Amino acid sequence: MKKICFALVLIWTVLALAACQSQMKPEEVVLAAVEPAKTADLEKALSYYTDDIVYTMVGFAPEPQVFRGKMELGDWLKQQYADQMVVQLHVDKVDGNQVYATTQFTSNFFRGLGIDWMTCKEEYTVVKGEIQAWSCTVTQESLEKFMAAMTPKVGIADIAGKWKWTGEPPAYFIYNQDGTYTMIRDVNGTQINWDVGGFTLADNTLTLTSSQESKYCSSGSKGIYSLRLTEEGRLELNMVEDDCWRRRPPEEGPQLFEHSS
């Protein structure tokens, strides 16, 4: 008799919780769904989603990452909880059963990259107190931080030497270990020391500063370029800004350089 009573109480409790959840406003369901992250309560978290939940994340991969059903979502959430995920959600707008939010999230993985918070724009579809669809689109600013953190850092030793521009007309940069550089251009078969000065390299950003000995750039003129080493061993430069117009690349976009003797 006691077992039967306990079972009835348990069933009543589950039904009562389900009824309570279905009476929650869509935005309340969304806010409640992120709370279990604080205690890594996976079972509680999954109770806020329908069995056919579809979660879509856009930004980290070339194609959207899609998780279908509670099993796939649960496996993903379990990984995030194990990595000590922290979530801060702000509801921006509610339109019927659609909830739009801005969410900041982080984990040991992102903290290890030196990133405090990532941000994504989210959309939820809530049906009868449960989330049926959920999408997260990582903001451009966050993606740029992520890509910068994931890009291997380039040091002076990596770029020391002579590099030839792969375009035309021929141009060369010589970077020395002591932080000086020389830019050479080929004019009608004659190589001319076009620009000389000093450079600094920090966080994959190259800053060139012309010296008084520069032939075509004013002393002190600066050029700022982001750079990386490609898998093929080429040096890729992207101009951010350059005071000296005669040092600027003749065309827009990434400029590739190859090691030259």
Image: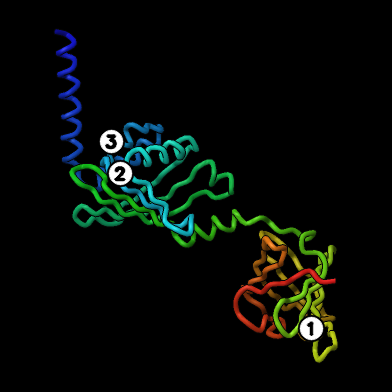
How far apart in space, not on screen, are marks 3 and 2 (Cα)? 13 Å
Q: Quadrant of residue 159?
A: bottom right
Q: Which residue is mark 3?
A: 47
Q: How far from the left and from the top, in percent, is residue 216?
A: 77, 86
Disc 3 to disc 1: CB gap under 8 Å: no
Disc count in the image?
3
Q: Residue at x 80, y 89 (%)?
A: 187
Which secondary structure, mark 2? helix
Left or right placement of residue 64 versus residue 18 in this view: right
Number of the front mark, 1 or 2: 1
Image height check: is 248 above or below 145?
Answer: below
* Residue at the spot 63% in from the left edge and 82% down from the top edge: 251
> Is 125 rendered above or below residue 14?
below
Q: How dense is the environment of label 3, judged by Cα within 10 Å: few (below 14), some, or many (20 and up)? A: some
Q: How far across and down, in percent of the image, does residue 14 sit?
A: 20, 27
Q: Amino acid at mark 2?
A: Leu
Q: Residue furthest bottom?
A: 188
Say which amino acid is labelled 1. Arg
Residue holding disc 1: 185
State left or right for residue 111 relative to residue 226: left
